[in-house]
Image: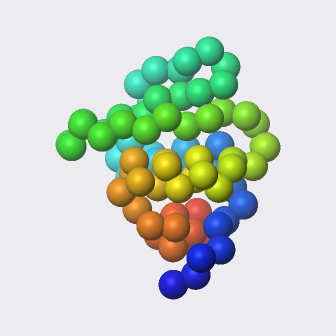
Amino acid sequence: MSTHFPDINSNQIVKVAQKLGFVLVKHCGSSHAIYSRKSDNRKTTIPIHGKKSIKRKTIKSICRDLEITIDELRNLIK
C-alpha cells in the first residue's frame, strides 16, 4: 500500500464521486458542492476551486466520506 497522496483537483474528485453513485445535491456559493448517495444516505462536501489541487487533509476527509482508500481513489482516477 502506497502512502503517496495523488495530486488531484475538484473536477477529478467529482468524477470519482459520480462513479461511486453520488449526485450533486446542492451548490454552496461558488466554492463548495454537496454530493449525496441515496442508497446509504452518505454525503460529502467537495471544494470547487477550478484546477487548483485539493489539500491532503481534504482528500483524506472526502475519501472517508466516500468510504474508499487512497489506493482505491488513485485507481478510480485513472
* Nearest to the observer: residue 77 or residue 64: 64
Q: Can residue 55 be seen at all in this image of the molecule?
A: yes
The residue lying furthest to the right in this view is 52
Q: Residue at x 46, y 29 (%)?
A: 34
At 65% from the left edge and 55% from the top edge, which residue is drawn?
A: 56
Q: Quadrant of the C terminus?
A: bottom right
Q: Farthest residue to the top: give it.
A: 29
Examine the image and state in which quarter residue 22 appears.
top left
**Could you say where residue 44 lies in the image, as x and y percent from the top left?**
43, 38
Identify which residue, 70 or 13, lies in the foreground.
70
Extreme residue toward the left, this view: 39
- Image point (65%, 43%), residue name: 10
Give x and y (percent) for residue 5.
64, 67
Is residue 16 visible from the viewing direction of this image?
A: no
Pinpoint residue 76: horizontal percent, then vertical percent. Answer: 51, 65
Q: Please state if 43 lies on the left or on the right of 24 as rendered.
A: left
Where is residue 20? Give x, y as percent. Answer: 38, 53
User: Residue at point 55% right, 44% down?
Assistant: 14
The one of 61 and 44 positioned closer to us in this rendering:
61
